[in-house]
């Protein structure tokens, strides 16, 4: 298979992003919203798509969608890029920044695609471990950001898979400490009470990523957007693929943005359920949960593989994150409906009780 030698060695050495499929009726493994787009709105979207011309390319710059997203975020459209999902925006930024020898600073553990894409684009990942309680190590990040070869710092805030978030005060310190670009992925930002958007006027080296996938319950249409200083946006957009937003996603996104009244109630419910589930987890012997600002909760148990399997046997799928750095005893659960969350909690207690897993809290106390 010598033809494979044409692939970059650093790519061949990688393990691609992979998610094993399980057939479980309760799916709490991908941080999705438990609320779908209403059927009546779906009908309107499908009708609008049917009436569009399918033989023509979509509008290349999506200006009406850009303006709608800018209005929603409270920013100027000149600083906004819309793409086919925020993961594509991570690729876009790394594609115009990363090069051999360039350091990309990434807290660890975090979303695995940041490091994967950095390696593919021949950059060098500089991992900065989270603190013992899974918070951002601000002094270490500021120190790393000051290195001469650091061009980009990527923060997921709130962070996946830990749920920690960086405050605007700490983010201001980080941005002020470096001339590197600082990209804050706010995929879960609606579940947190701060946004980096407030710091944009002061810091032209700030990039913010947002999405309709999580709080808007529209992961299936794959719409993400980037916000930055207009001059920086003009450089980044040079790497954007034309016509990447298809007519269905474009039409659906516009319709959803016109019904934002639905969203805040759902956000409030998810945040309330997150706190309820967290408190319930603190009462289960053998479980150590960590506070979260996202629609997910990280928790530790003595035997996560056995607990993960035990939950699947009861029809509940969560995420096993033991392959991440520092998380050898950790699992992650997404916040679902009240019924789904209750089923998860009941199944977790049953699995721990039947298997005799306990003592984790005692070991840590």
Image (tube, grey):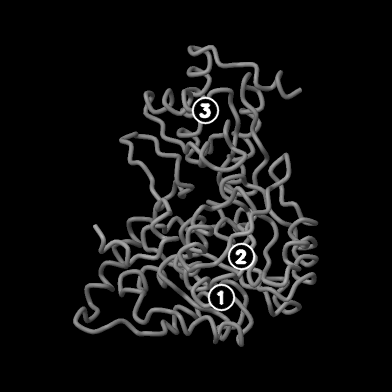
How far apart are the alpha carbons under marks 1 and 3?
Answer: 38 Å
- For this rendering, which residue is in front, 3 or 34? 3
Which quadrant is home to the N terminus? Answer: bottom left
Q: At numbered mark 2, what does the secondary structure look like: helix, strand or loop? A: strand
Give x and y (percent) for residue 107. Answer: 65, 54
Give x and y (percent) for residue 181. Answer: 65, 73
- Is the residue marked by circle 1 packed among few (<14), some (14-19), or many (20+) residues within 10 Å? some
In the rendered structure, find residue 304 and report the number of the disc placed on it.
3
Q: Along the horizontal axis of the image, is 202 left or right of 334?
A: right
Task: Establish if 225 lies above or below 268.
Answer: below
Q: Earlier in the sequence, mark 2 or mark 3?
A: 2
- Residue wearing tag 1: 97
Q: In the image, what residue occupies the spot 58% across and 23% down?
A: 302
Given the current orientation, which residue lies at the most extreme left position?
A: 55
Q: Quadrant of residue 140?
A: bottom right
- Is the residue marked by circle 3 packed among few (<14), some (14-19), or many (20+) residues within 10 Å? many
- Asked if the residues shown at circle 2 and circle 1 are in contact, with their CB atoms under 8 angstroms apart, the answer is yes
How far apart are the alpha carbons under marks 2 and 3?
Answer: 31 Å
Q: In the image, what residue occupies the spot 69% across and 43% down?
A: 134
């Amino acid at each position: 298979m010598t033809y494979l030698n044409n692939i970059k060695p650093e790519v061949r050495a990688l393990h691609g992003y992979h998610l094993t499929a399980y057939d479980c009726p309760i799916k709490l493994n991908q941080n999705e919203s438990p609320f779908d787009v209403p059927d009546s709105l779906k009908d309107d979207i499908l009708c609008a798509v049917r009436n569009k011309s399918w033989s023509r390319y979509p509008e290349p710059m999506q200006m009406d969608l850009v303006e709608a997203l800018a209005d929603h975020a409270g920013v100027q459209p000149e600083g906004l890029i819309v793409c086919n999902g925020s993961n594509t925006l991570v690729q876009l930024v790394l594609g115009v920044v990363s090069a051999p020898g360039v350091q990309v600073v990434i807290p660890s553990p975090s979303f695995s695609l940041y490091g994967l894409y950095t390696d593919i684009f021949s950059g060098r990942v500089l991992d900065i471990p989270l603190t013992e309680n899974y918070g951002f190590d601000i002094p270490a990040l500021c120190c790393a950001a000051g290195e001469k070869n650091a061009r980009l710092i990527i923060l997921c805030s709130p962070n996946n898979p830990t749920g920690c978030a960086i405050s605007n005060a700490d983010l201001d310190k980080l941005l002020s400490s470096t001339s590197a670009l600082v990209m804050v992925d706010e995929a879960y930002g609606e579940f947190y009470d701060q946004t980096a958007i407030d710091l944009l006027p002061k810091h032209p080296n700030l990039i913010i990523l947002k999405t309709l996938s999580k709080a808007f319950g529209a992961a299936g249409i794959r719409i993400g957007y980037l916000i930055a200083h207009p001059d920086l946006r003009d450089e980044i957009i040079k790497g954007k693929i034309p016509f990447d937003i298809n007519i269905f996603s474009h039409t659906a996104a516009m319709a959803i943005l016109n019904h934002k009244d639905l969203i805040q109630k759902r956000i409030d419910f998810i945040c309330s359920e997150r706190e309820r589930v967290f408190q319930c987890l603190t009462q289960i012997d053998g479980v150590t949960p960590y506070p979260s600002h996202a629609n997910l909760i990280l928790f530790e148990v003595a035997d996560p593989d056995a607990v993960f399997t035990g939950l699947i046997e009861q029809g509940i799928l969560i995420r096993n994150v033991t392959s991440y750095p520092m998380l050898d005893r950790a699992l992650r659960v997404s916040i679902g409906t009240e019924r789904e969350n209750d089923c998860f909690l009941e199944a977790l207690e049953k699995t721990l009780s039947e298997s005799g897993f306990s003592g984790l809290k005692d070991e840590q106390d």
